[in-house]
Each structure stands twice: as structure tokens, then as C-alpha cells.
Amino acid sequence: MKKAFITGVTGQDGAYLSKFLLGKGYHVIGMIRRSASSDMIGERLRWLGILGQIELVDGDLIDLSSLIRLMGTHKPDEVYNLAAQSFVATSWQQPLLTGEVTGLGAVNMLEALRLMHPSARFYQASSSEMFGNIRAPVQNETTPFYPRSPYAAAKLYAHWMTVNYRESFGLHASSGILFNHESPLRGVEFVTRHITDGVAQIKLGLASELKLGNVHATRDWGHARDYVQAMWLMLQQDVPDDYVIATGRTVSVQDFAGMAFAHAGLNAADFIRLDPARLRPAEVDALHGDAAKAAEKLGWRAHVALEAMAAEMVDADIARYQRKAG
Ligand code: NDP
Ligand code: GDP
């Protein structure tokens, strides 16, 4: 039985990746950090019905000794480094923590591998945010980077260190440059889930408006369930490499909101209020990915259409509030 080790197992992607790997017959080991609310840990894994099927182990990306111990003990075949301070807006409030976890944390993981278990295959969760102030209207693996937030700068460091460890030490280390991907398990602070959660509240009479920042920003949004398959595919290749993962379809925040409200039978314009406090110090105005390399080399493509994803998220949020109301 193959062993996979996942950091960030309690996050959106960690949950979907765990489910996918369990389906492939893997033994999944998920690293969790200590929390005073231990009964709340693993909510997403519980939602997917897989909490009991994962071996949960203690560790933290900023505690190198914990990573060394875990690599030495478990010697996994594959390591997926998904843990991060992953919210762009927060990265301006906590730039140092973001650098430590999202940037140096990845290097801690690489070091633990190099020292204890260099034969493992490694996946780094890189991000389309690294393209930032875009240098080309459509971005692929050859597009220059221009990070626009502490988060993106930290991810860029982690990305290049992954490339560097591959080239310096021969590690089987791959980096997935994933464009935004969402699901009913997306953190509610991100705009798609903020919208579908707001739509659900308005639909059920729990709220009367939805506050948004820059509704003109555009993103290439896909579904997390599709995207975690690409992570696995990268680690099945003989040669490690970097891949852009995207749908190739870009819409604005406003258009996504339109889809979500329409699914609930509501008119977005009646409820959206612009909130200047939600604007960012520097914005990534537009992202549009070209995943041709992943299609050709990995045989990967996105399956879930944006409208279907918006509908799934709205329905899940409505069901959540209905369950809460008893
Ligand atoms: P989430 O924010 O949902 O999950 C982040 C995970 O990291 C959580 O499990 C969190 O644990 C964990 N974590 C945070 N800090 C630490 C730490 N110091 N030590 C160990 N674990 C820690 O992110 P997603 O699942 O959406 O994304 C997965 C990865 O992919 C992230 O690295 C993200 O930056 C990257 N990415 C995501 C994209 C997207 O659109 N979703 C796009 C491109 C890249 P806890 O539950 O304890 O907080
Ligand atoms: P990001 O691409 O990783 O920053 O993902 P987000 O979902 O956080 O933001 C996507 C885009 O939506 C950014 O350009 C934000 O400025 C924009 N946006 C507009 N209103 C909001 C909002 O209320 N919350 C969030 N999170 N983003 C918003």
C-alpha cells in the first residue's frame, strides 16, 4: 500500500486530495497542528466522510524538528505540501507569519525530506498569484512572475526553492501552479464562498445585503475536486516538473456573483453593496491560465463547469444554514 503524507490536510485541498488518494488505495497520513479547539479539527474531512480513514499526526510547518521526526518515522512515498497561510488579504496584516509558513515552511519540508527521506516524491502547492501584475494576457509555465502581495512573494520563494532542490539535490520535486479553485469546502473568507454563503443567508432571510470589494477583478476559477487530481498526476511522472493548472475560462467577481444569485432565483444587483474596506493595498486584476502542458503531459483537464460549481456551493450553503436552524 502506497503512503501519502499531506500537510494542510484540514484545508480545502487537503480534504479533497485525501478522499481522492483513499479511493486509489493509499494510506493517507495527515499532519495537523495543535489546537485548543481539538474537537473542531477535521471538519472538512468529516464533511467528506473520511475523517476516520486518515492517520492524523502532530506537526507544524514552522517546526523543522517535527517535520524531520515525521519523515524519519513514516517514510512516505509521496509528500504533498499544501499547508500555508493561504489568504492574500491576511498576508498584508501578517506578512512575517506568511513568510515563515508559506515561504520558509516549504523549505523546512524540503530540508526534512532531503535529510531523512530523499527518495520521496514531493508536491509544492504553488499559486497563480505569483503572476500577480500579469506580464502576459494568458499565463503559462514560461510567463514571468510579478507577485503583488506578501502571500505571493512567499509562494514565489517556495516555488523557486522547490525548483532549486530538484536541480541541486535531484529530489523528485514538482510544483503545481494552480489557479484559483473552489468548492463547498472553500474557506468562507475567499470571495466565491463569501458570495455563496451570502446568497444562502439572503435566500433564507438571514441577511439583506452582500458586501464586496473589487467586483471587477477576474479569475480563472476551477473546482478543487478536479485540481487535486492534477497534484497526484504530477507525482506519477518519471521526471518532476512544474505545471500550470487552470480551466482557461476567466470571469469577473461580479459575474460569479450573478451566477450564484441567479441559481437561488435572486438578482445580484439588488443585494450587492460595495465596501471600500474590502479593497486591497495592491490588486491582482486579472488571471487567465493556459494548462496546455498539463493536458499534453499529464492528460489532465478540468471537468466541472463554473455554473455547476456555483450551484453546488450555493446549495451546500443553503443546506448548512437549514441544518443549523434545525
Ligand atoms: P486552506 O487555507 O484551506 O488550508 C490551509 C492548510 O494549511 C490548513 O490545513 C491549515 O491548518 C494548514 N496550515 C496553516 N498553517 C500551518 C502551519 N504552520 N503548519 C501546518 N499546517 C498549517 O488552503 P487550500 O486548501 O485552499 O489550499 C491548499 C494550498 O494550495 C495552500 O498552500 C494554498 O496557498 C495553495 N493554493 C490554493 C489555491 C486555491 O485556489 N485554493 C490556488 C493556488 C494555491 P489549520 O486547519 O490548522 O488552519
Ligand atoms: P485570491 O485570488 O487568492 O486573492 O482569492 P480571493 O477569493 O480572496 O479574491 C479573489 C478576488 O476577489 C480578488 O481580486 C479580491 O480583491 C476580489 N474580491 C472582491 N470582493 C471581495 C471580498 O469581499 N472578499 C474577498 N476575499 N475577495 C474579494
Image: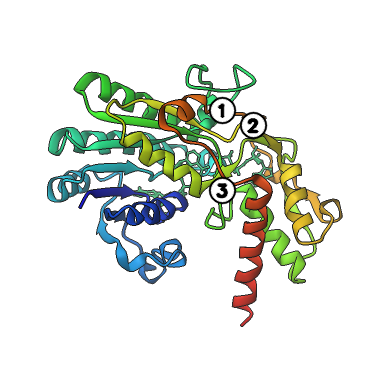
Q: What is the secondary structure assignment of the residue under circle 2?
A: loop
Residue drawn at x 16%, y 50% as measured from the top left: 74
Q: Does residue 45 appear in this view?
A: yes
Instruction: Give the alpha-carbon distance from disc 2 to disc 3, as whole Å.
Output: 20 Å
Q: Is mark 2 within 8 Å of ligand 2?
A: yes
- Label 3 vs label 1: CA separation? 21 Å
Task: From the image, tell me which residue sits under label 2.
Answer: 283
Q: Earlier in the sequence, mark 2 or mark 1?
A: 1
In what quadrant of the picture does the C terminus appear?
Answer: bottom right
Mark 2 closeness class: few <14, some 14–19, many ≥20 residues within 10 Å: some
Relative depth, front residue between 263 and 74: 263
Question: What type is the residue that disc 2 sits on?
Answer: Glu
Measuring from the top left, give residue 298's x and y in whole percent.
Answer: 41, 32
Of callouts 3 and 1, which one flags the residue occurring earlier in the amino acid sequence? 1
Q: Position of residue 299 (x, y in %)?
A: 44, 33
Q: Is the C-beta of the residue carrying label 3 under 8 Å from the nearest atom of ligand 1?
A: yes
Per the image, label 3 sits on a secondary structure element best described as: strand
- For the residues bearing labels 2 and 1, Cβ distance under 8 angstroms: yes
Image x and y of residue 115, in percent? 14, 34
Relative to 131, does residue 279 appear above or below in the rendering? Answer: below
Question: Mark 3 is on which residue type?
Answer: Glu
Label number found at residue 182: 3
Q: Which mark is residue 148?
A: 1
Disc on the earlier residue, 2 or 3:
3
Does 47 sit above or below residue 274? below
